[in-house]
Image (spheres, rainbow, N blue to C red):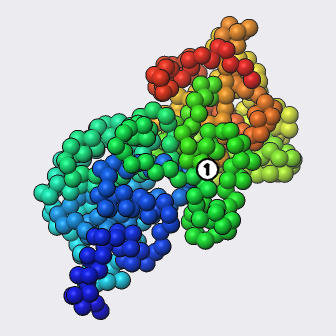
Amino acid sequence: MLTETEAIKIKEGIDENPVWGIEYLFQCELWEKQREIVNSVLLAKNKKTAVRSCHDSGKSFDSARIALLYLIANPDSIVITTAPGWTQVKEILWRELGSAYHKMEDRDPLLTVGGSLSTTKLELSDNWFAIGLATRKEGEATEVAERMLGFHSPTGKVLIIVDEGSGVKEPIWNAIDGLLTSDLAQLLAIGNVYRTAGSFAKLFKTKGVYKVHIQDADIPNIKENRIITPGLMSPSYPVEMEAKYGKDSNLYLIKVKGEFPKSETDALIPISDVEAAFLRTQVAVGRKRLGVDVARYGHNFTVLLVRQGKKVLSKEKYSKRSTMETVALVERKMEAGNIRAEDVDIDDIGVGGGVVDRLQENKHNVNGVNVGATAEDEEHYYNIRAENAWAIKAWIKTADLPEDDDFLQLANIKYKWRSDKKGQLQLEAKDEMVKRGLESPDVFDALALTFTGSMPSPFPEPEEKDSEGRPETAGLDSKVF
């Protein structure tokens, strides 16, 4: 047990050297970029610190410990954390915060500030606490923003931590701006940069903001080409991402290099929409639809995907399965999910035709879909594949996707307008994607099949605009594959 004098010396050390304080209290070792972020915030050097990061860089680990040390060092202070979705707040940042808090308790009882810790709140006193806020469902951003503006610290000491900043709604960013009018208030905003527009992206173009960039080459595991720190990016990750998506892809730039995405006006679905869907929670409503994209042997996968309304319930991938094995997989999926045959859509081009024939012989009246056939809305879409893809583009704005890298395929699909076919929308062919070094979009195709016959509204006004304020579709008439 420490004496009171020893505890006071440690407290002074925390104030003067917060990196040492975090490593001592929470029994961890920070690496270079983490130390840089800690010093920017906890030495009160900078009012705003913005971090654009690659995948698995330990940013949430760092943020949780910064939040706790800020409270310890600043009596009657407030820490507010937010993220695009409730699950992101509760299961990532606040899980880290809870783990760090209990390690601090075990380490030095004399330094423990006590208080009451719940799932997303640590309360030391009425005016001294940390709290996690986020939207639980679509349309709550304004309510969360109003609640955020209701917090006031008697000392003026407020730290706002924004996790996955690209996905945080603008009303919440507006509320953050209101809180930062206090001279002593600070902001730490972290995340992957999925968008070139919005308040998070703007931080990296604003004077007076301390900017930190973390890419794969900065990560200790990558530098040493071995696992030094479990949980950080593994040496195999950049190699896998390059093989799947290519070094020039936005996915590689964002996930591996921590860079802004390139402007791709011919991409059907922005990567920011996919990432937002990963963080969103929706209730499954309506009939279940099963989409089956069939492969036999080779490098492609057979994918069985179940969608119910705005939510993807499951995705299964299989390689090197015979036609009869695939038939059995579909039958088991139908039975387990209580999915009616008329709600099963199977791409019956090539080997898929055998799967459809056998299922129908087995008295399952499934739908065989030739995605290359004429679209229901022939005036606007080149074929069924393009028609279904446009339905996904509208659907994903409010969708709930499992956080699975396979769904990043959605951000790889390019499209164009055909000048020789009355301006119809056409998708890039699969063989053209393979030429770009991409894998076959089997998961995208399985999802698209679940929209067969949905008849989306032709070409609704896109919600997103590029960095110059132009609609996503601007300039597509000149695109070729």
* Residue 221: quarter of image: bottom right
Is residue 191 positioned above or below 233 on the image?
A: above
**Residue 419, position in %: x, y?**
70, 9
Of residue 13 and residue 202, the one placed in the foreground of this image is 13
Q: In which quarter of the image is the C terminus?
A: top right
Disc 1: CA contacts within 10 A as few (<14), some (14-19) or many (>=20): many
* Residue 383: quarter of image: top right
Residue under the point 71% across and 47% down: 242
Residue 423, can we see it?
Answer: yes
Q: Determine the residue located farthest toward the left in the rendered image.
A: 154
Residue under the point 20% across and 49% down: 183
**Residue 210, position in %: x, y?**
39, 49
Q: Quadrant of the N terminus?
A: bottom left
Residue 306, can we see it?
Answer: no
Q: Regarding mark 1 in the picture, which secondary structure is present there? A: loop
Residue under the point 47% across and 36% down: 398
Of residue 184 and residue 305, the one placed in the foreground of this image is 184
Of residue 453 and residue 11, the one placed in the foreground of this image is 11
**Residue 455, position in %: x, y?**
59, 21
Is residue 244 positioned above or below 120 on the image?
A: above
How many dots with numbers?
Answer: 1
- Residue type, label 1: Val
Report the residue marked by disc 1.
256
**Residue 61, position in %: x, y?**
45, 64
In the shown orientation, is residue 287 left or right of residue 345?
Answer: left
Residue under the point 33% across and 80% down: 105
In the shown orientation, is residue 66 left or right of residue 357?
Answer: left
Of residue 460 and residue 457, the one placed in the foreground of this image is 460
Is residue 124 positioned above or below 53 on the image?
A: below
* Residue 474: quarter of image: top right
